[in-house]
Amino acid sequence: MPRTAGSDGARTHEAIRQAAIALIAERGFEAMTLRELAGRVGLQPGSLYRYFPSKNRMLVELMLEHLQFLLDEWQRVQPETADPRERLCAFVDFHIRSHTLRRQEVFVANMELRSLAPADRRRVVALRRRYEDVLAGILGAGVESGAFHLPDPRIASFAVLAMLTGVGTWFNDAGRIGKRDLIDQYTQLVLQCVGSAPVNACAPAPSQRRSP
Amino acid sequence: MPRTAGSDGARTHEAIRQAAIALIAERGFEAMTLRELAGRVGLQPGSLYRYFPSKNRMLVELMLEHLQFLLDEWQRVQPETADPRERLCAFVDFHIRSHTLRRQEVFVANMELRSLAPADRRRVVALRRRYEDVLAGILGAGVESGAFHLPDPRIASFAVLAMLTGVGTWFNDAGRIGKRDLIDQYTQLVLQCVGSAPVNACAPAPSQRRSP
Amino acid sequence: MPRTAGSDGARTHEAIRQAAIALIAERGFEAMTLRELAGRVGLQPGSLYRYFPSKNRMLVELMLEHLQFLLDEWQRVQPETADPRERLCAFVDFHIRSHTLRRQEVFVANMELRSLAPADRRRVVALRRRYEDVLAGILGAGVESGAFHLPDPRIASFAVLAMLTGVGTWFNDAGRIGKRDLIDQYTQLVLQCVGSAPVNACAPAPSQRRSP
Amino acid sequence: MPRTAGSDGARTHEAIRQAAIALIAERGFEAMTLRELAGRVGLQPGSLYRYFPSKNRMLVELMLEHLQFLLDEWQRVQPETADPRERLCAFVDFHIRSHTLRRQEVFVANMELRSLAPADRRRVVALRRRYEDVLAGILGAGVESGAFHLPDPRIASFAVLAMLTGVGTWFNDAGRIGKRDLIDQYTQLVLQCVGSAPVNACAPAPSQRRSP
DNA sequence: TATGAATGAGAATTCATTCAT
DNA sequence: CATGAATGAATTCTCATTCAT
């Protein structure tokens, strides 16, 4: 029997998406059960299958969706300038904002690669690689222009990305440190890290206006 | 009936430990099954229970063991000097070496916190915190002594630790970059990051002699 | 919202009937799903319930319909003669023709008795029994008249019926053997079987004119 | 917890085999549930998986086992004579005995081909074909030697086999007709069918002594 | 006439765990 | 020290069926 009278597929779909992200982030994909997910959305477990064909496909879709969103957003908000220093600042701002705002999606996308079938993993990794390339590109340009001092821009991009993404594991919106302060500090750390002194030389303004 | 005549409990125990670490790193704790673990060690699933009381206790023990090892090792190899810059270089060397050598243990300890019961998680987190404090201490001392320039040493310690630990996700022993080179580059990145120029001012030699 | 504007209930009903017969013959009643059936007819599963009250009732109706058809057809095409030999020839012709033409219905009616509730099974078995009685009657008359030589006409009727019905499991319309030839051979086999020599003494013509 | 103290794998395995054959014959493979099967053997459903890797493999094994048994038994009990008539009588005796004795296995092997995956079906059909070839061989030899009169021995073999196998659908050990009588009648029917008069010319004795 | 959202029961299968031997 | 038979609870997933729209 159809329980909910005015039930709406699109609304349910979105509810499942959100609950799934939260649950996977909490417990891990393998540990999360469809019972639990269904319970949170107010459905019977079997009803979930109207919205995705298997637990695994659901994970893949969530991950691809998130990574695609990141790429699209960066396209949208990236500054028009070609100046590596300014672009780097914008990237730091963008990354920290998006990774604290969509903290659970990030967590899932980073932690659950193992749960993917090889073919799916390849697709996800490919998208992630494209995101990494954004930063690597900025660093490379900066090294060439003399703005940054780095022996190997790709390695540095790994280092900077790890540093930035790590914020998600400890930062707390309600905590002692505000997001503005957080971004400023990380901007300084990153600029120092890539060998671009002095600090505070890049305007935080643009990213503030357009960030997600 | 005992299968292997001269079978040795201690040897079996160690074999299980290693297989478990590898398996958990590969598949994740929840996804790994005791059947599979038993299979890799050449036992029947039930026989594993001679060596640990439950799947969950096994994980806790593996994690505590690893973190305790890290702390003990650092105690053993840390330089006697009080100079923050030298100590930081030694820490970078130590961390990267231990985290590439015992890569799977690191991975497990970082990824499987979720699978722990709250009480166990607290114990593990406490140990990890002590390790983080090592770095935070070095950075704090450096800021005080004027060797480093950082607004908030605790935050910087998170940043540096994330950066260093991230190495484990991409570094490949058989790859293009050697471990010596890797450490040198990360040393430079870290020193720049904490605002301690110029580069290459700290000797890599000591860590080579004493690393784990 | 009705999907197809000028959609026609009767047409849909017949489409379901045919698709159901084909599907049950392919997969078996239990293995067939209403989703699949609906898919083949271009409907949603729920829509099937406009046409029958349950999956089980559908099966019963299909089976009764088929058996009733067989009985009606035989009434229509049976020869007027009382000669057992001629009647037997006509029956062989009729049975093989109907059982190769409506092969799937036959298959379903023979294989899916198990899927019926006891009460339904009784109704179906009763109809089938009436069909078996047709042959048993012919054989009995033949034995009495001396045309056939059989110790027990009922047993012989089982034997002959099994033999004839078995055709459905191997005969292929597109194969090496034509239907005319097939019927001739089985006619000979049956006549020999019931001890009515010599062969080819009964004209195949009548059944050709009136067969279904 | 292991419930049954002196539980014995081999005994359990055989119990499952028998219960499975009976249940599949009763309800059909798709309709039978492992819950039910386990219940009949006094196990939990999951425990069945110690004995076969999936419901489908179980079916395949049961079918292959039965067909192989038939072939082996015929090898064992077939008469040494080359006389087609005698061999045919022996085959009728053997077939009816084995098909009434192992009635459920026969039923399963004949009805559940549909439930098999294509590759498995091929293996089963291949074995069944070898059994059919036994009869086709006898009929062919008889036609050549002039003992039988048949237009197409292969078609006749289908007819005879269907006739004989059909016994399983109605014969009842406790019924009006005894097995000796049954075999005699079918022997007569078959001999007449293949055009080998007069009746009772082949001794039933040998098969009686050695039948399964 | 048909859809589409949902149910609830039950399917096969897996798994950590137990314990007599 | 180790096996092997078994448990029992849970898991993902499927399916016939219902009914507001």
Image (cartoon, coloured by chain):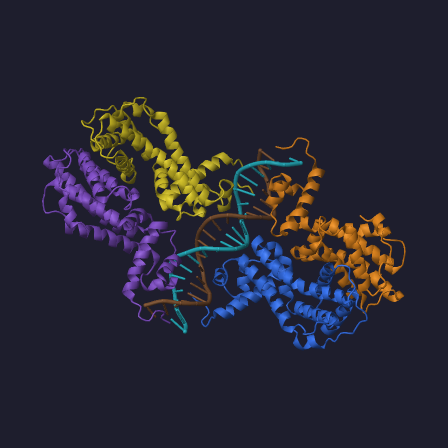
Chain colours: A yellow, B purple, C orange, D blue, E cyan, F brown
* Quadrant showing the C terminus of chain A: top left
| Nearest the eye: C140 or D72 | D72
Count every numbered label the image shows and give the total: 0
Q: Is residue B178 left or right of residue B4?
A: left
* Quadrant showing the N terminus of chain A: top right
Can you see residue C130?
Answer: no
Q: Where residue D164 sits in the image (x, y, percent)?
A: 71, 65
Q: Is residue A186 left or right of residue B197?
A: right
In this view, A19 is above or below D32: above
Q: Where residue B109 sits in the image (x, y, percent)?
A: 28, 49
Q: Is residue C131 left or right of residue B84?
A: right
Residue depicted at x 13% and y 46%: B206
In this view, D60 is above or below A177: below
Seen from this angle, which residue lies furthest front?
D144
Can you see residue D104?
Answer: yes
Query: Residue D30, located in which quarter of the rendered image?
Result: bottom right
Q: Where residue C52 sits in the image (x, y, percent)?
A: 67, 45
Seen from this angle, which residue lies furthest top?
A81
